[in-house]
Image (spheres, rainbow, N blue to C red):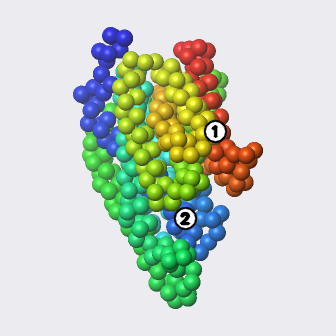
Amino acid sequence: MNNKESVPVVSREVLAPFILVTSLFALWGFANDITNPMVAAFGVIMEISTAKAALIQFAFYGGYATMAIPAALFVRKYSYKKGILLGLALYAIGALLFFPAAKYEVFEFFLGSLYILTFGLAFLETTANPYILSMGDARTATRRLNLAQAFNPLGSLFGMFVASRFILTALDSDKRNEMGELIFNTLDEAQKIIIRSHDLAIIRNPYVILGVIVILIFIVILISKMPQSIKSDVQGSAIDSFKRLVKNGKYREGVFAQLFYVAAQIMCWTFIIQYAENLGINKTTAQNYNIVAMSIFLTSRFITTYLLKYINSMKLLSAFAVFAMITTSGVVFIEGMMGLYLLIATSAFMSLMFPTIYGIALNGLSEDDSTLGAAGLVMAIVGGALMPILQGLIIDQGSLGGFAAVNISFLLPFMCFFFIAIYGYRTLKIHVN
């Protein structure tokens, strides 16, 4: 342990590049959480069905699924820095395309803009995570990634704040009468056109500002000296790397663990509102509980980064997964505010999981294999688009077996955490490097 303590998490030589790359984690956290409320907003503004409005999430996750592998191949051929620059360029283009999308008021234009934006996010996540791992001693790689990932929820919190304070509250289409009914639905077409133009501009502005900020970050990284970690003379082919990864049990199971983690995270955060509403709490107040959950998540991320200095990452992952199983079982079987508090508390145990699964799965891989391996772990983010749909179908049932269906629905994240606990155990006892 003393030997491990003497190894710095981030050395002075790479501190500046580490800070620059870490800022990217906040960037995609912001994009995630400013976009989530847009599903409901577009449904009203564009007068489209919930199913069609949900294409916002499909475009978001689809961008990750489409571009993760090409991003990895690009980084293999060139470098981490060039991968980051291309990711920032795509991010900025997608964000700035919200301007013409709002002008022409075409929903599909917004979808295309978001799809391109998440091309950039896929590049950034596929590149930044293994880049952070490579910035120092392998013994502190997981702690280093946990530290960098701690800034992701900071971006998420800011995205939630901007969405709630500068977008949702400013939408004229969301105004209601004394009966609680949307006024927008009662207006004639001429009035709707005026409100639609106003509200689409409200949605547009944060994205355009974000695009300008991303361009500035692009320039800073372009002129900065960054460590070169990918060798230009790498020999093996991508096919060879893929074959090695498929045969690697720790990595292969890590991809599934990551998929289940992202699914659990999205389910726990998305349906806090429905759980609270079942207790008679209104949406505005329920959203505050969501913000509390994210704040706990952020605080716990910093605490666990410290704990990893003394506790094996695989042991801590298993322990936190078991604790998450305990809290989610309470969410299922304990009705009332205690169930809601346990749901919020689950965020404390989720905080460790994404970067730790990531670090464990890639640990021991060559840099040649790590870039493609990172792509598989980024593609696992698609789990956030799959199981929440099933949870929504369960919630729609109203009640099941004498319990509120919204309570029963949290058996799904419970099962996800069970798989993660098993993965932590297997990496500790079976997949030993």
Pointer 2 with pointer 1, Cβ within 8 A: no
Q: In the rendered view, would you say 304 is above or below 97? A: above
Q: Position of residue 316 (x, y in %)?
A: 48, 23
The residue depicted at 60 percent of the width and 44 percent of the height is 335
Which three-letter amino acid code belongs to the residue tagged 2?
Ala
Image quadrant where residue 146 sits: top left
Which three-letter amino acid code belongs to the residue tagged 1?
Phe
Q: Nearer the viewer, residue 416 or 70?
A: 416
Side of 192 where 396 appears, left or right: right
Residue 370 in view: no
Instruction: Give residue 232's mark.
Output: none
Side of 158 where 53 appears, left or right: right
Image quadrant where residue 409 sits: top right
Q: Nearer the viewer, residue 251 or 181?
A: 181
Q: Position of residue 176 (x, y in %)?
A: 50, 75
The local crowd at label 2, few if under 14, some if 14 to 19, many if 20 or more residues have their Cα within 10 Å, is: some
Q: In the rendered view, would you say 143 is above or below 1? A: below
Q: Residue furthest top?
A: 2
Q: Quadrant of the C terminus?
A: top right
Residue 118 in view: yes
Q: Position of residue 400 (x, y in %)?
A: 74, 47
As helix, strand or loop, the secondary structure at mark 2 comes to helix
Q: Position of residue 10 (x, y in %)?
A: 30, 27
Which residue position is annotated with label 1?
333
The local crowd at label 1, few if under 14, some if 14 to 19, many if 20 or more residues have their Cα within 10 Å, is: some
Image quadrant where residue 43 sits: bottom right
Which residue position is annotated with label 2?
40
